[in-house]
Amino acid sequence: MHEIGIAEAILDAVEKRAAGRPVQRARVRAGALLRISEPAVNQAFAMVSAGSPAEGAHLELVIVPARHICRTCRHITTSDDPFTACDGCGGIDLVTEGGDELVLESIQTTEAAHVPGNPRRDSGDPARPA
Ligand SMILES: [Zn+2]
């Protein structure tokens, strides 16, 4: 299962950036050529992050298409297919750029997401005397 290796790489980056803080969400840019889907990578991430501060974090994937630059007409075709033909001239002499990146864009830790409580609204002590 190829998502495990990707999830491990993401976890590594997330843990470094979180520096021990509990992580709620992480946004990751993933090249289309990696062929990962959000549910599959989240499933793998849940496994590899168990017991770490990133356990339970949700990954948001931003899929980045690959760019194929035509050597014949210089047209740029974006596609998630590594074997594509030029949109402009139908040629197949293309240089592929990107599509295989894996970049941690941002993380959201529980501290950053903390909303200060309303001090007037007592969260309640059930044993409080009336
Ligand atoms: Zn072309």
Image (tube, rainbow, N blue to C red):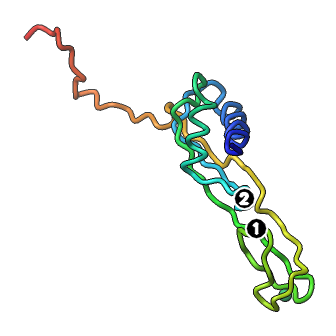
**Label 1 amino acid?**
Ala
Quadrant of image for the C terminus:
top left
Q: How many marks?
A: 2
Does the residue at mark 2 contact the one at mark 1 (Cβ under 8 Å)? Answer: yes
> How packed is label 2: few (under 14 Cα within 10 Å), some, or many (20 or more)?
many
Q: Secondary structure at mark 2?
A: strand
Alpha-carbon distance for marks 2 and 1? 7 Å
Which residue is under mark 2? 31
Quadrant of image for the N terminus:
top right
* Residue sitting at the far front: 1
Q: Position of residue 31 (x, y in %)?
A: 72, 58
At 70% from the left and 67% from the top, the residue drawn is: 65
> How packed is label 1: few (under 14 Cα within 10 Å), some, or many (20 or more)?
many
Q: Nearer the viewer, residue 28 or 20?
A: 28
Is 10 left or right of 46, judged from the image as shown?
right
Indicate if the residue with disc 1 has its beta carbon within 8 Å of ligand 1.
no
Ligand 1, by image quadrant, is bottom right
Is 66 left or right of 92, judged from the image as shown?
left
Is 61 left or right of 99, judged from the image as shown?
left
Which residue is under mark 1? 66
Q: Secondary structure at mark 1?
A: strand
Q: Position of residue 97 (x, y in %)?
A: 83, 67
Q: Position of residue 99 (x, y in %)?
A: 76, 62
**Label 2 amino acid?**
Gly
Q: Position of residue 77 (x, y in %)?
A: 76, 79
Q: Is residue 52 above or below residue 109?
A: above
Q: Earlier in the sequence, mark 2 or mark 1?
A: 2
Is 88 left or right of 124, judged from the image as shown?
right
